[in-house]
Image (cartoon, helix red, strand yellow):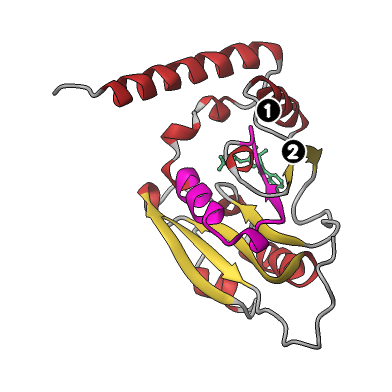
Amino acid sequence: MQMSPQRIFRAAGNRAEVAFRFLLRLLIPFDPWHLMPLAAKDYAGGIIGHLNALPRERRGRVADIGCGLGDILLNLDFEERIGLDCDAAVLKAAEIARRIHFRGEARFAVFSFPEERLDGRFDAVILTNWPHSIPPERLKSGLLRLFEENLNPGGCLVIDTVSRNGYPYRHDAAVLLGRLGGRIEPIGDYPCGRRVWKVTKQSEAPGRGQGRGR
Ligand SMILES: C[S@@+](CC[C@H](N)C(=O)[O-])C[C@H]1O[C@@H](n2cnc3c(N)ncnc32)[C@H](O)[C@@H]1O
């Protein structure tokens, strides 16, 4: 099969990125899972494409909980980007990657879900490729709090579920997300029975608005 110049550049770019992560990990020993580049995570590309296609007024503030090296966050075209993770080492590496790759402004902070509370309201909150490690009741009550306290009207939660054997919890999306009272829609299907969901909070009726808390 003949490789197009674009494919050759992409393959070379991926190799360079893996080499960069390998070197970064010698400096900051983060979990080897993060050696995987963005190009190998098709769900991440799907989320980036979906959120960046939202209208400008819906791309104000975004938080990525469990952001890892920031592969999703640092490719989002939002006004304010916050990356949160319970692993301080990976956040340190994410900040270096942000600077070296000239990925624009973003803040990173240590945060553990659902024990800690998020401050302020967002247009999008992302939780991907780790909710399968949280028991359903804990995850459900944490999501409910996020949805009520941290989303702007018209804002959305983006979360994945997995159905393949081998994950600690294979959440039932209807049970997990049904109680939130938002509009639930699948935004992509991927290997491992991974499905990415968006739950949108109803916009408030005119006159009842409480403003876009920032
Ligand atoms: C498999 S990585 C996924 C990274 C990123 N979301 C992605 O999809 O590319 C999972 C990340 O979530 C973080 N994490 C796991 N459980 C968490 C929790 N309860 N609260 C915050 N971060 C968590 C881990 O430290 C790790 O960086």
Q: Which amino acid does label 2 sit on?
A: Ala
* Quarter of the view holding residue 76: top right
| The image quarter in which residue 56 lies | bottom right
Is 48 contained in the magenta span? yes
Residue 190 x, y percent position in the rendering: 38, 51
Three-letter code, disc 1: Arg
**Which of the numbered marks, if any, corresponds to residue 106?**
2
Q: Where is residue 188 in the image (x, y as percent from the top left)?
A: 41, 57
Q: Which residue is drawn at 60% across and 11% down?
A: 23
In the image, residue 134 lies at what x, y percent? 64, 55
Instruction: Read off the residue under disc 1.
Output: 98
Asked which secondary structure carries label 1, the reply is helix
Q: Which of marks 2 and 1 is nearer the N terminus?
A: 1
The single residue placed furthest to the left in the displayed view is 1
Residue in the foreground of this view, choosing between 97 and 205:
205
Q: Which residue is drawn at 74% across and 60% down?
A: 122
Establish if 214 lies above or below 40.
below
Rounded to the nearest angstrom, the CA distance separating label 2 from label 1 is 8 Å
Q: Quadrant of the C terminus?
A: bottom right
Q: Quadrant of residue 149?
A: bottom right
Q: What crowding class fits label 1: few (fewer than 14 Cα within 10 Å), some (14-19), or many (20 or more)?
A: some
* Residue 43 on the magenta segment: no
Residues shaded magenta: 44-70
Percent of width and height locating residue 104: 69, 33
Tell me, yes or no, whether the two marked residues, 2 and 1, touch with CB atoms within 8 Å. Answer: yes
- Under circle 2, the secondary element is loop
Q: In which quarter of the image is ligand 1?
A: top right
What's the residue at 42%, 43% (across, down)?
Answer: 42
Which quarter of the rendering shows the N terminus? top left
Q: Is residue 151 above or below residue 167?
A: below
